[in-house]
Amino acid sequence: MNAEIFIAELRDLAPAREELEEYGLDETEIDSIQSCFLAEQRQLNSPGTVKSELNSLLEHFSCDSIEIAGVIFNASVATLPQGEHFASLEADPLVIEPCGTIAWFDHASTDSDFHRKVCAENGGAFLEAMIFVATVWRNKRLWKDRMDEAVSRCVVASNSPESQDFYATLLAGMR
């Protein structure tokens, strides 16, 4: 999945203001929830060389308001010893490794002994899996009793059997 499709599909998942008003939410709460599904396109002075779909996403869109199942995207990519930090799950960085694999690292580990979990084969596969995670959360009544299926579908979208722990963690809050 590319960055433009990810942004369009995420925007389509945003709950309508009227739907959120039915829950008794005020304007501030509604704006906060809706902002998790939206990213403004950036004005670029010159096209850069994009290494991955995640780099493209952060270069072309302001993503720091996007939050999916606890994964919060950064405003820009930061360099860590393990790779390019593009998002976090709580305090743990999600990183594009030099080989292109997307991984999740324990923030409390040392550089020489870090705890790593694979999230996806590459940036495009990560975006595909994360749209599915957002879809499951958005339609949680339909998925409530089908978490194993949801995790399996995320793993398939991520193109990485090693990613099961990551997606099980993201969807655990729905059990």
Image (tube, grey):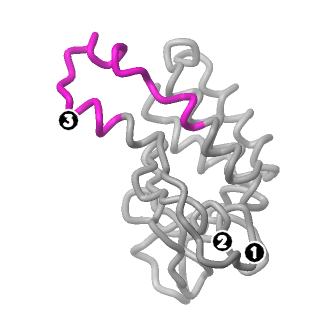
Q: Which residue is mark 3?
A: 28
Label 2, label 1: how many angstroms apart (C-alpha)? Answer: 10 Å
- What amino acid type is highlighted by mark number 3? Thr
Select label 2 or label 3 by which is in front.
3
- Please name the predominant secondary structure of the magenta segment in the image: helix
Give the mark nearer the N terminus: 2 vs 1.
1
Asked whether the beta carbons under mark 1 and mark 3 sit within 8 Å of each other, the answer is no
- What amino acid type is highlighted by mark number 2? Ile
Badge count: 3
Residue 60, above or below 66: below
Label 1, label 3: how many angstroms apart (C-alpha)? Answer: 37 Å
Q: Which residue is mark 1?
A: 51
Q: Can you tell which quarter of the image residue 99 is in?
A: bottom right
Residue drawn at point x = 63 percent, y = 39 percent: 8
Q: Which mark is residue 96?
A: 2
Q: Is residue 156 magenta?
A: no
Label 2, label 3: how many angstroms apart (C-alpha)? Answer: 34 Å
- What amino acid type is highlighted by mark number 1? Lys
Residue drawn at point x = 42 percent, y = 47 percent: 70
Give the mark nearer the N terminus: 2 vs 3.
3
Give the mark nearer the N terminus: 1 vs 3.
3
Please name whichever residue, 102 or 51, is drawn nearer the observer in this view of the structure.
51
First to last magenta residue range: 10-33
Asked whether the beta carbons under mark 2 and mark 3 sit within 8 Å of each other, the answer is no
Asked whether the beta carbons under mark 2 and mark 1 sit within 8 Å of each other, the answer is yes
Residue 5, above or below 62: above
SS under mark 2: strand
Query: Would you call the spot at circle 1 few (<14 residues within 10 Å), some (14-19), or many (20 or more)?
Result: few
Please name whichever residue, 130 or 49, is drawn nearer the observer in this view of the structure.
49
